[in-house]
Image (cartoon, helix red, strand yellow):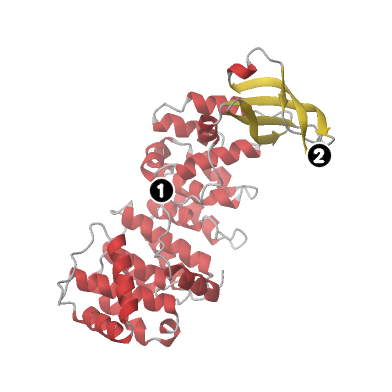
Amino acid sequence: MTLRTRAAAALVAVALLDFSAPAQGCPGCGPPTGQTLTSEVAQADFILYGTLGNAKPDPKDPAKGTTDLTIEAVVKSHALVKDKKVFQLPRFVPPDAKPTKYMVFFNVVNGDVDPYRGVAVTPDSKLPDYVRGALAVKQKDIVTRLRYFFDHLESNDIEISGDAYNEFAFAEYDEVKQLAPKLPADTILKWLKDPNTRVSRYGLYGLLLGHCGKPEVAKDMRKLLDDPERGFSSGLDGMLMGYTLLDKKGGYDLITKLGTDPEKEFLVKHAVLKTLRFFWEYQKDVLTKKQLHDAILALMTHKDIADMPMDDLRKWKAWELTGDVLKYATVESHNELPIIRRAMLKFAIAATWADPKNAPAAAFVDKARKDDPERVKLLEELLRDEMKPPPPEPPKK
């Protein structure tokens, strides 16, 4: 997304609400690609696995008809399928060109059967066994449960490996942190070195390796991070997190190098920002407060991302950096962008609430109130909704 697109999208959003980033599970992971199969199994009334055949379209409506499912496994049972070898779907499913098997999810509504989802897999798929195993560990302790999914992360079956990854993407960091030290570092490093490993996995694997690897593994991670052929823009945040956990100095030096380079693309800068957030929120004893502040101030010099670190410093209540934030009101490259001006004003408003004697912040807000009182009022309302607990209402004049 270009800078202009980001700014335009943000302006449309702020006209209605102040959108914050959605809460995410494991840091370093990308967003889940959908529900986990365990969740879907819980929602379905019954699930069958087998081969489709004998498909018959309805002459009056090609979209309707019937298709037989020859049952090879009952993943989740129901009275409607008891002792059946073949179950007829109330749908016409055209034959596949290649041999294919299906896991079909059903709901029963007022007696009507609805096969609402079908997962197509190769004939040798282990998907039914995987789902049964996932259900078997569902109520186990978090280490046992996540270890099951770790063992399937690099499955050759894309449905299985994708679901295993989703389980980690939905997991909280504290849960992943319990498992990570017990994992085989050599296996994870092998995955990272493999050029065929999906780039979407780099972040998770880097973070896991930071918890289970020995200090010497940091050298291997640095080689990967410095390899121009790898291009860790996707998953870079998790790689930086893991590398810094193993080598504080080397990790911080690389964070600083990437964050200060004006030639780096937005995704790289954003990965640096997410890494700094990780150490601020989850691993407070790795980098000092000054290191985090210095690194985030360096990011603020880049106009394509400056609004984000400004928002973070507000959330971190770094009021001692008021001058460092508000100085960009006189920097043309930054002040020309509404999204950055808005971030500065939100910081200044919050700073005056925290300390009415903060003269630079108070002056900034007073000027903004004279120029556009409705805008200041709107941002104050949004901030009150966002802050927990909200600041006290100002006295009425």
Please state which amino acid type lies under the numbered disc 2: Pro
x, y percent for residue 132: 56, 24
Label ID, residue 62: 2
Q: Decide which of 273, 78 is in the foreground and name it.
A: 78
Q: Secondary structure at mark 1?
A: loop
Label ID, residue 392: none
Task: Give me the residue at 36% from left, 73% from top.
Answer: 343
Specify few, some or many for label 2: CA neighbours under 10 Å numbering under 14, 14-19, or 20 or more.
few
> Does 95 appear above or below 18?
above
Label ID, residue 215: 1
- C-alpha distance separating marks 2 and 1: 63 Å
Q: Secondary structure at mark 2?
A: strand
Nearer the observer: mark 2 or 1; the answer is 2
Tell me where residue 190 sits by quadrant.
Answer: top right
Res. 295 in view: no
Left or right: 164 in relation to 278: right
Task: Give me the residue at 54% from left, 38% from top.
Answer: 164
x, y percent for residue 61: 80, 39
Q: Decide which of 300, 260 is in the foreground and name it.
A: 300
Left or right: 247 in relation to 125: left
Q: Quadrant of the N terminus?
A: bottom right
Task: Give me the residue at 61% from left, 47% from top.
Answer: 197
Tell me where residue 97 sits by quadrant.
Answer: top right
Residue, far top: 83
Task: Give me the residue at 37% from left, 59% from top.
Answer: 277
> Does 295 appear above or below 388?
below
